[in-house]
Image: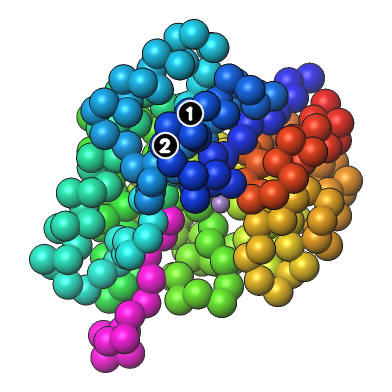
């Protein structure tokens, strides 16, 4: 039986400098690293070079989380959307240069004018998704879209939203199952069983089902034993990346024990 690999998102140290973050890379207990192309860790050519050298030295395999602060792929404003696309395309190019396994992005959001143009954000979300998918394919990068948490105005949070998305998108776009986010709407099991053949990547972190706390594994109310059994039952072969912002080493060993 193939067991999932356990990885680590560098989200937990996003408050530290890029240099400090790279200092952690050879000390963490995994070679599967999800980089966050945001804030102090935003990628550029020089940093990609540094990361490639580290990958060569330590056998690291990267995944890249797309920029997400102030990003809305369903924006109704063409000029703003163009600026965001420029930023996202740069991220895809850098992800390609890092031979990254998957580029994770968030679905779009409703805005203050959505009520006047019902459904428009859904259409733009699909359009931008297809555009990113094709751009990434041209750069040898696989993209995957993540289920995002309540109570934000994201337009793809539930199993129902993703069913509609896959009925309409007509491209082979993978799903990033964020287990913590799915816990907030009580749909961990439903996501795992409904999209067993779509899930290409997972984020693992804990919470109490109310807000997106990104706690260590076992520090919230998620039933990780049950979740691990479900993950094994769908023969998931991708990576499960710890996206907690505390207790990260402990979280990785817990998941290794449960999924091993
Ligand atoms: Mn996530």
* Residue 118 is inside the magenta segment: yes
Q: Measuring 54% from the left and 40% from the top, which residue is drawn there?
A: 10
The kind of secondary structure the magenta stretch mainly shows is loop
Extreme-bottom residue of the structure: 116
Tag 2–tag 1 contact (CB < 8 Å): yes
Position of 40 with respect to 213 (left or right) is left
Classed neighbour count for the residue bearing mark 2: other residues with Cα under 10 Å, few (<14), some (14–19), many (≥20):
some
Residue 213 coordinates in the image, percent (x, y): 66, 63
Note whether residue 259 is visible. no
Residue 33 lies, with reference to residue 73, above or below; the image says above
Nearer to me, 233 or 52: 52
Helix, strand, or loop for circle 2? helix
Nearer to me, 253 or 149: 253
Position of 52 with respect to 212 (left or right) is left
Q: Quadrant of residue 111?
A: bottom left
* Residue 159 is inside the magenta segment: no
Q: How many marks?
A: 2
The quadrant of the rendering that contains the N terminus is top right
Q: Measuring 58% from the left and 20% from the top, which residue is drawn there?
A: 26
Classed neighbour count for the residue bearing mark 1: other residues with Cα under 10 Å, few (<14), some (14–19), many (≥20):
some
Residue 260 coordinates in the image, percent (x, y): 83, 26
Q: Quadrant of residue 103?
A: top left
> Which labelled disc corresponds to residue 22?
1
Residue 59 coordinates in the image, percent (x, y): 53, 12
- The span shown in magenta is 106-119
Q: Measuring 32% from the left and 52% from the top, which residue is drawn there?
A: 129
From the image, tell me which residue sits under label 2: 18
Q: Measuring 73% from the left and 31% from the top, which residue is drawn there?
A: 235
Residue 171 coordinates in the image, percent (x, y): 36, 44
For marks 2 and 1, give the CA distance.
6 Å
Nearer to me, 17 or 258: 17
Extreme-top residue of the structure: 57
């Amino acid at each position: 039986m193939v067991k999932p690999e356990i990885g680590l998102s560098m989200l937990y140290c996003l408050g530290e400098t890029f240099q400090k973050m790279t200092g952690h890379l050879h000390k963490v207990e995994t070679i599967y690293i999800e980089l966050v192309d945001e804030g102090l860790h935003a990628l550029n050519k020089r940093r990609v070079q540094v990361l490639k050298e580290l990958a060569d030295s330590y056998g690291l395999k990267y995944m890249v989380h797309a920029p997400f602060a102030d990003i809305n792929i369903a924006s109704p404003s063409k000029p703003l959307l163009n600026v965001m696309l420029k930023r996202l395309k740069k991220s895809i190019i850098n992800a390609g240069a890092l031979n990254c396994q998957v580029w994770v992005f968030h679905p779009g959001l409703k805005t203050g004018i959505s009520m006047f143009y019902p459904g428009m954000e859904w259409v733009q979300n699909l359009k931008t998704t297809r555009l990113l998918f094709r751009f990434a394919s041209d750069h040898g990068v696989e993209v995957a879209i993540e289920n995002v948490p309540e109570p934000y105005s994201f337009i793809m949070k539930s199993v129902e939203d993703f069913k509609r998305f896959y009925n309409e998108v007509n491209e082979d776009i993978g799903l990033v199952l964020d287990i913590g986010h799915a816990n907030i709407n009580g749909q961990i099991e439903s996501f795992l069983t409904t999209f067993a053949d779509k899930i290409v990547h997972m984020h693992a972190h804990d919470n109490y089902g109310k807000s997106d706390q990104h706690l260590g594994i076992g520090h919230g109310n998620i039933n990780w034993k049950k979740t691990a059994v479900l993950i094994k039952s769908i023969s998931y072969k991708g990576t499960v990346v710890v996206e907690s912002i505390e207790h990260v080493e402990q979280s990785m060993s817990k998941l290794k024990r449960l999924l091993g």
